[in-house]
Every structure is written in C-alpha cells, then in structure tokens.
Amino acid sequence: MGRNVAQKIISRHLVSGKAVPGQPIAIKIDQTLTQDATGTMAYLQFEAMGIPRVKTKLSVSYVDHNTLQTGFENADDHLYLQTVAAKHGIYFSRPGNGICHQVHLERFGVPGETLLGSDSHTPTAGGLGMLAIGAGGLDVAVAMAGGAFHLTMPEVIAVELTGQLPPWVSAKDIILEVLRRLSVKGGVGKIVEYTGPGVKTLSVPERATITNMGAELGATTSIFPSDEMTRDFLRAQGREEVWTEIVPDPDATYDAKITIKLDKLEPLAAQPHSPDNVTEVSKLADVTVQQVAIGSCTNSSYTDLMRVAEILKGKTVHPNVSLVIAPGSRQVFRMLSENGALTHLINAGARILESACGPCIGMGQSPPSGAVSVRTFNRNFKGRSGTADAQIYLVSPETAAATALTGKLTDPRTLGTPIEIKLPKTFPVDDSMIIPPAAEGAKVEIRRGPNIKPLPMNKPMTEEISGKVLLKTGDNITTDDIMPAGAKILPLRSNIPAISEFVFSGLDPDFVKRAKENKGGIIVGGVNYGQGSSREHAALAPMYLGIKAVIAKSFARIHKANLINFGILPLTFTSEADYETVNQGDNLVLKNVGERLQTGAVITAVNETTGKEIELDYDLDERAIKILLAGGLLNYTKQNQN
Ligand code: MIC
Ligand code: SF4
C-alpha cells in the first residue's frame, strides 16, 4: 500500500511499536532544538542524566525568548546555556541571531529527518519536509541523551490545496482557513499533511507559516513534501546537499481529507481570543486599531517583511497606530538593511525591534488598555500580550501593513496593484553568531548565576490521591493561563520556587495561596485542557505546589505528556456530565490508584463534599503508567539505570 510523507519518515525512524493510529510508538530523533525559556530546564535535566555529549546528529540551543534583560536573570540564563552547550556538544545560537524556528529553517533543517524541539512551534520545519515535533524540555533532554521519543501514532489527515493564491492573499490566510474549519482542537492526535497541486505554488517560507500554525490546531505536527521548491530554498541557503525528494506515493492514503481552493481564499483574521475564531478581514473594516505588530516565528521571513516594506514605502503609519516590527533572523535583518527595505520601514515610522520573539510572548510592547492590536503572530489568547483587556487579531503581513497605514482593519486588496516579491537566488550566509561546541567538553566550566536554581523532584505516586479541587476551569484553558509568560514572569523560568508563585495568576490570583494552604490538591478542567505552548513549567510549577491530578474532559497532547513527565495524573471524566457535579472546593478521594492503573480498572473518585461517586478514565500506555508511579520521568529514568 502506498505511503504518505509522514508515514515514510516515521517508518524510517520507528524504534518500537506499530505505526497504527492510536498505538504507542517510539521514534529515533535526529535533531533537537531548545529555546532559552524552556532550555534551561531541559539542560538541567540533561545534566542530571550524566551523559557527557549529546547523541543526536545535531542539537541546537537558541536564545530568542528572554532577551529584554531587565535584570540579571536573562543574562544568567544565557551564560548557563552557552557554557552547557559548549560542554555537551550543542550548537549555540546567540541572542540576536534570531527566532529558533526561522533560523532552524534557514540553517539546519533537513528533509526526511526528525526534529524534537522544546517549543510547540517546532513543526515550522515541516515546511522543509522534516518530521518536526514540539515537546516538553524533559522529552528533548531524553532525546539528546540518545533516547527515543514516545508518542501515540497519530492519524494522518490530508489538506489538499488546489489552484493558486489570488493577489494579496497569503500563506497565513491558508492556515487561518484550516483553523476555521478544524478548530483549535481539530488537530489533536493528528498529523496534517499538505498535498495537491497547490503545494508547488508555495515557497518554503510560505509552507513554514502554515506548518508553524498547525500548533494552534493541536496537531502533533504538520508537514509538506520535499520537492523542487524545497531544493530551491536549500540551494539559496547554500545547503542543497541535504536535499532529498520525499513525496507521497501515488496511491498514498490518508485517514481524512479536506480541500482548500486557494483561488477562492480571501484575506482572513483570527478575532479575539482564539486562533480559530476566523472571519474575512473585509467584514472587520469598522475595527479601529491602536497597534500593529509584525514578526514572530509565523511571519518574519525575508519575503514577509519585503512585502511589508513595499506596502509601507513612501507612506507614513497612521498617527494613532504604533507599528512594531521584529525580523525573524539576523539573515533577514541584514538583507532588509542591505537592500534598503529597512529604510522604508524606518521612514514609514515603524519601531524596529531586535530579532527575537518579543511582543509575541509579551516581552515588551504591551498595547494600551482596551486597545486593538493586529498581529502577524500565531496566538491571540487573552492576556498573552501583557494587557488583560486588549483585543488581539491575527492576520497576514499584507493585512497588517495595510492596517498600519489606515488605522482600521484593512483588506490589503484595497491597496491596488499587487506587489511581487521573489525568493532570492542566494541568501547571505553568515553563521558567526552560531557557536559550535567545544572540542573538549570536559574543559568547559558551566556558569550558574543565582537565577539557576536546582530542579525540584517529585515523589513516587501514592496509592491514595486525595485533596481539594483547588480550581475548576472551563474549556480550552491554555498553558498561558496555567503558567503565564511576559516580561515579569518569563525571567523566572530557571527558578521553579519563584515562578510557581504565578501559577494561574491571570485567571485566579488566589490560586497559589489556596494551593499552599491545602498543601496541594486537584484541578478540574474542561475540553482541550493545556492547549498552546510546550512549556513544562505548566506542569512543573503545579507539581511544586503539590498538584497530584488533573481531571478534565480532554487534554492537549504536549501538556498531557508534560503532566505525565512530572508525575501529575491526567484523568478524564468517563461521562462528561460528571464535570457538572464537581465544584471548586470539593474534597475528592481516589483510592487504589496505582493498582487500578496497572490492571486497567476505572478509577473512582469519591466526592466527600457531596457524597457522590464518579468514574474516571485514563488514556495511558504502559510506559506512561510506570512513569507516573515513579513520580515522573526523571525518577523513572534513574530507577531504570540502576
Ligand atoms: C509560546 O509561543 O508560547 C512559547 C513561548 O514559544 C512556548 C514555549 C515556552 O513557553 O517557553 C511554546 O510555544 O512552546
Ligand atoms: Fe517565539 Fe512567539 Fe514563536 Fe513562541 S510563538 S517561538 S514566543 S515567536
């Protein structure tokens, strides 16, 4: 039987299990990436494993999230990351070199290989035909140590693209259309593979915009074939030798298929506060805008920013709009500077930021109270911008630039004659901001400033889990809700005792106090609990506060894996109606948990407050159960070493 692109790469990397949807599998990881906000924990975990040098083909550590350096914390982290990378065989991309996903696409991605990254947007490299998956830092540490990555074999669904994009409609509009159709949970347990004649009309950076935002579908990953377009891009980056063709067999099958007619697409926008709340930009012409932000790992490539520069050339930003632009990489920045496009941006009144995540993760540029901010980013969760009541819209670079000029959400088709920006034949390559590892790691001394605190460990699971329901949430709770980021909290990522003071702080400022008073407890959630970021701090900090279990209607993939890795039991309601019977403050008792997990029996929760009993389910394979019983993956790994 014919195979699709995802199945081909998985079968070449399969270490255990059968590649049948729903079955537990393990795959070999060729490359890893980390970024600084998740990386410090990942490397502390790697160090705890006692392995001198990474066993992957390539591992890269990027610094792109925490670059504000408002105190010593970020800089301490950077020094730790640089020295730990040099010691253990990891390439180090210095702050200023760009956003991990953009740089990885330019300089390191290899079609047909596997990439595991401690960032949910790692699937960006799927634009190159790589099987690129986001995971918690601990899973990435295990991969660096040579361990396989364990996951549930996803279904592979095809998104067939036909026709060609009309003028002023761009790759961002394609992924917004996919989000409109599939929703933020439509990709859970799935790989999204792009097929059809429309594929060859899209360049690698355009494909990468689409695979990047597959994270917002909750998908395991998204992938394009590796074809002549891929080869062109790699050639232009001086890396043609890593190219191989990977296309689906003519008789390849998929578990489901949707079709998008590119010629029928219009400029789209995701409205507040969810990436799947999508409508046509033309319907939003009345929305007055105070801020426009262009950049992030979704839309900060050379072609994206050149389009913006062409639109803004010779014009001035609307007097009521603040326009900020962050180029995705130093390569992009340099090209804009050398060809004069940067001058157009500056002349138009843009505020140019360094090449980093910046406002996407709330590191500066929070909009004014109640403001509308139009962004080319990938997430518009409430509060993520740093302004609790801001309204964030997600759009293409063309729509963002048009909007910056008028001060209203503007359909770029109103701009008139279309602009055409071609991918350059050669990109200027300069890897001097990527530091190769030391030849002799043993000689490198690791620098640990006061912000680098030791890793807290969990205890093995107890047979009885009991405690208060400390919080009951609604559906689609994000990891930004659980463990917020932003300029105040992000610098504490290497200091779990300090960062745990902010768990659920946006949603419920008293949560931490309650958790401490009760010495931990249980959280109750709705559908798709933990969507969004890969940050394991959303599991690690609750673990530190004594959270023993999360009972939800359903979970997002990465967050569920992170809960397991840190020994927090993820359970689901056998009947969703039972969600209604549990209230915040109720006391729950779960008996014989370990025994039940091992025998596959349902777990019963006795609600001591109401006297009611409810049944709880779990979707955990044998390995996950062993990890939970051990109190997390680090304990489990240690037990298995002895
Ligand atoms: C994000 O976009 O939320 C982040 C910040 O890149 C996260 C990682 C993190 O929280 O450090 C992600 O997407 O995984
Ligand atoms: Fe950085 Fe934003 Fe991309 Fe996350 S989504 S990696 S914060 S640019």
Image (spheres, rainbow, N blue to C red):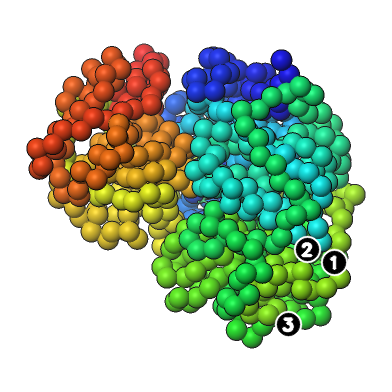
The type of residue carrying mark 1 is Pro
Q: Is residue 496 above or below residue 635?
A: below
N-term mark: 2 or 3: 2
Query: What residue does disc 1 label?
Result: 418
Find residue 407 and report its horizontal and vertical position in percent. 63, 80
Seen as rendered, the residue at the extreme right is 425
Seen as rendered, the residue at the extreme bottom is 319
Crowd class of label 1 (few under 14; some 14 to 19; many from 20; radius 10 Å): some
The type of residue carrying mark 3 is Thr
Q: Quadrant of the N terminus?
A: top right
The type of residue carrying mark 2 is Trp
Query: What residue does disc 2 label?
Result: 168
Front-most of residues 63 and 412: 412
Front-most of residues 248 and 95: 248
Query: What residue does disc 3 label?
Result: 316
The residue sitting at 24% across, 45% down in the picture is: 580
Q: Quadrant of residue 95?
A: bottom right
The mark lying in front, picked from 1 and 3, is 1
Query: How far separated are the C-alphas under marks 1 and 3?
Result: 19 Å
The residue sitting at 13% across, 41% down in the picture is: 587
Find residue 487 and report its horizontal and vertical position in percent. 45, 62
Crowd class of label 3 (few under 14; some 14 to 19; many from 20; radius 10 Å): some
